[in-house]
Amino acid sequence: MMMKEKPVVAFISLGCAKALVDTEQMMASIALHGYPIAFDPDDAEVVVINTCSFLELARAESYDVISEFEYKKGAGEVRAIAVVGCLPQLMGGELNVMFQGVDLWIPISREANIATELDELLGYGPEAPRKVTPLDPAPRLLVTPPHTAYLKIAEGCDNCCSYCLIPRIRGPLVSRTSESIVLEARQLAQMGVKELNLIGQDIAAWGRDRQSPKGLSGLVRELCGIDGIEWIRLLYAHPASIDEGMIEAIASNHKVCKYIDMPIQHSENRVLSSMNRRISRLGLISLIERIRARIPEIALRTTLMVGFPGETDAEFERLLEFMDVIKFDRLGAFVYSREPGTAAASEADQIPEELQGDRLERLMALQADISLEKNSALIGSEVEAIIDGYPDDEGNGARLIGRIRAQAPDVDGIISLVGDANPGDIVKAVVTTAGPYDLEGNISTAGQ
């Protein structure tokens, strides 16, 4: 008897790039088990929602998306709904009461079994995975542009910041072996990936749990030796974990983008201590001075939090002064969210939401001025850019969309270019116009 054809499955990935990698791995897993993949949920019979639960806002977004597909299921537009990732990992059986239209809940700890669990849900017997090209040799189905990919080098976190649920959701730091990371990077290069963005909760801590003698700097040097990989970018490095080896690895390897994403969260000692950030204001200043002295062209990205419990007006003003002195090239910010189960949730001096919002608005207005100043300094200079695509994704736009080495995908701005190139090309371009976040320029030399 012939096995009935399996339904088309679509994935919706919410939250961070680390969750996106999980989504890509799950997509490949079920494709290898014979499930057709759709990139538009409207074309699918089964929808898998990979959720985020880091903050209340993220959980609210997850709830909204789940509710939307429960409605579609009730209308007969969707056959089954699976919800995976951080939300079921954090909340467990509580979700069964909230969303009775969901057919399958899969926490992070069971994501590797998604194909088997879908088979059981939909009434298919066990079978050997079927190889589906062009997934081979990488066990991921990339949803990023084909020339760029995220490479997750570790899971979990040992930092235990007082406001953060990540250790509770993702567990302690577990570093992948260097062999598995390098193998995956080689596979990605064979698929045409030119840009690797290294991610983890704290990539600077990679190897600490394994007592690896090479550390992140040794791993980066290995990745630089892979043919086809042209750019390597380091994302999410806790400042207390950044050492001289990491700084030297960025400074001395041409393939490594002169860029560090180092969330500092705040500048003031009392707040940093209450956050359990393991670094002081002077420590931050010293670190930034060392980085800029060794790598003068470095682009520093950070994340700040406003409205942390007990943050005084004076502490917030000093944070703005710190920003104005340091002048980060890239900066994101968010208001403190009181997350049940975190140490900070029990703090007495919670800041009113209206005041949090006012502080965020002032902070981002200052950063817009700083970013414009930084970007304006690039006008007239020649930069290297990777072409991501066309404005309308069909090649009919007058300009190309790209990013310079100092622009990470998804979180930073872009450079809009005039000239002749194709997606995936790395080109030289002259910057002609600058805004607070985006640049414009003309291609001067075609690249790879």
Image (spheres, helix red, strand yellow):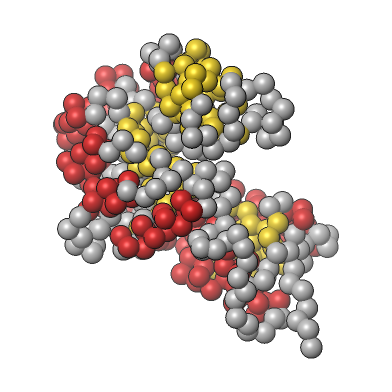
In the shown orientation, is residue 334 left or right of residue 420?
A: left
Q: Is residue 377 visible?
A: yes
In this rendered view, identify the residue nearer to me: 52 or 315.
Answer: 52
**In the visual, does 375 lie left or right of 83?**
left
Q: Quadrant of the N terminus?
A: bottom right
The answer to whether residue 191 is above or below residue 260 is below
For image coordinates 65% across by 77% down, the residue present is: 119
Task: Determine the image quadrant of residue 212.
Answer: bottom left
Image height of 294 relative to 54, above or below: above
Q: Position of residue 335 (x, y in %)?
A: 43, 37
Q: Quadrant of residue 364?
A: top left
Q: Position of residue 223 (x, y in %)?
A: 33, 50
Residue 244 x %, y %: 17, 41
Residue 107 locus on image (x, y percent): 51, 67
Q: Is residue 268 above or below residue 218?
A: above
Q: How many marks?
A: 0
* Front one among 241 and 375: 375
> Residue most toward the bottom?
1
Q: Report whether residue 314 is seen.
A: no
User: Which residue lies at the image location 57% right of the left edge and 61% below the top edge?
Assistant: 135
Q: Which residue is painted at 52% across and 43% down in the image?
A: 147
292 and 61: which one is in front?
292
> Which residue is at 71% across, 34% downward?
394
Lateral position of residue 368 relative to residue 201, left or right: right
**Left or right of residue 285, residue 112 in this image:** right
